[in-house]
Amino acid sequence: MDLTKYIRRKAHEVHIGNVRIGSEHPIAVQSMTNTPTANTELSVAQVERIADAGAGIVRLTAQGRKEGENLENIVAQLRNEGYQTAIVADIHFVPEVASIAARYVDKVRINPGNYRTSNGELEALIAQCRERGVALRIGVNHGSLAKRIFDEWGDTPEGMVVSAMEFLRVCRREEFDQVVVSMKSSNTRVMVQAYRLLVEAMEREEMTYPVHLGVTEAGNGIEGRIKSAVGIGALLADGIGDTIRVSLTEAPENEVPVAQMLVDYYKQREGVFTVNYPERYHATEYVRRSDVMTPVVHDEITEQFRVVESVSNNPTAELRAAILNMDDREPVVVKRRYDDAEAESVALKAAADLGVLFLDGLADGIWIDAPQLDEKMVRDIELMILQAARVRFSHTEYIACPSCGRTLYDIEKTLADIKSRTSHLKNLKIGIMGCIVNGPGEMADADYGYVGAAAGRITLYKGREIVERNIPQEEAIDHLIALIKANGDWQDPE
């Protein structure tokens, strides 16, 4: 990582079907289906919609033998219909399914939380992948670390890195380099620190595996886009990332243009910005530079703040250098002008440029100068960036998964319904999860959780603890509201 300028981290080439990733290639965009993988027609149609939207890589869940075997039919039909899209199988819980899927797909994603490195399972899968030219993703999730890792490290960025490095060392020992690694979390601070720690760990051991970026359970709408841009943008600004997925609780094809906009935004990051005091920067821990308790938005700025405005096309490096070079601890407002007419474009760019300065504890206020947007929209975007960066909570946060073939209910409609009844609540986090794969773990810092338990059945959580099991879906939101009220967290709408 170079604080003075933008430079891509060196990553070797990995083949995922016809797609090549690594630092010598453009950052690849991908998405994931939410159709039942056992249903060939629905899955093929959705893969094609995602591909038509511009994604070169599409992932499908394979939670059992039936879904793993049906990947053969899905891939065959896609190829017959002229689609050369790289297909990835997503495996949880059942290592046997990975070996089934590897017969048919271009990449297999496994979760170290569901594997062991001591029984030869990983070596056998590597041998199979090598034989067919299949890539492998070591996909660590904050919410589903192995018990032995969790018991020693907790659900920390450090624990995530330990988990990844165990598996990467096996891959290197087996001389298998067609490997991608990811460190996903719904908490942007955890996610960014985990990736940075991973890159440091790989550099110490001279590993150059490409990195897949993503913020899990980002939610939907402009808020979900901002949360993704804060996390992904922070790492792209560091030159980290070779393929990305923006996870939205929407139709998966909606994710692709958002991801592509981020990729395009980082194609040119020019300029060199001198940093006189690099020791003041803490990349892998949160250290506040000033003692201002609550970061401010533009209409709250007082005389105590110094305003630092970016004028280059590398705002993150420019503003970071300016702040690190200050000789005092005067609180700083970071400012940037955006002339875009669309709120989504302003939100994505500002979140990518400025969010990292709050994740890193450097900035104390945000000022988005967007003359083509109305004042309220600008203020809302500023508040959403501060919330996504985990420094100021001003509205209900929804930790909502994007859904996949494992999802047991209509999560997009459910999220809308829950929002319509709870969005007026303050400083509350609600997790809405399709299934238990990452649900309880990813929503660990949520106040309440709504998780698919079986078809038409929901389990409710208070924090990590189960409160009610297997509630009929049509009654579950009422039960969620009752739970919030019972714990004293309800306020009536104004």
Image (cartoon, rainbow, N blue to C red):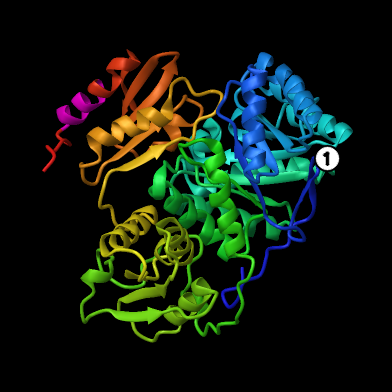
Instruction: Tell me the chief SS of the magenta region.
Output: helix
In this view of the protein, can residue 330 be seen by the observer? Answer: yes
Other residues around mark 1 within 10 Å, as few (<14) / some (14–19) / many (≥20): few
Query: Residue farthest to the right?
Result: 131
Query: Where does residue 262 sit, x and y in percent of width and height?
Result: 56, 57
In this view of the protein, can residue 329 be seen by the observer? Answer: no
Choose top left, top right, bottom left or bottom right for residue 170: top right
Q: Which residue is mark 1?
A: 174
Choose top left, top right, bottom left or bottom right for residue 325: bottom left
Q: Is residue 484 magenta?
A: yes
Depth check, front residue: 83 or 330: 83
Q: Is residue 112 above or below residue 22?
A: above
Residues in magenta, as a range:
479-487
Query: Where does residue 234 sit, x and y in percent of width and height?
Result: 51, 61
Query: Where does residue 178 sit, x and y in percent of width and height?
Result: 79, 44
Q: Is residue 42 above or below residue 127?
A: above
Tell me the SS state at disc 1: loop
Depth check, front residue: 472 or 259: 259
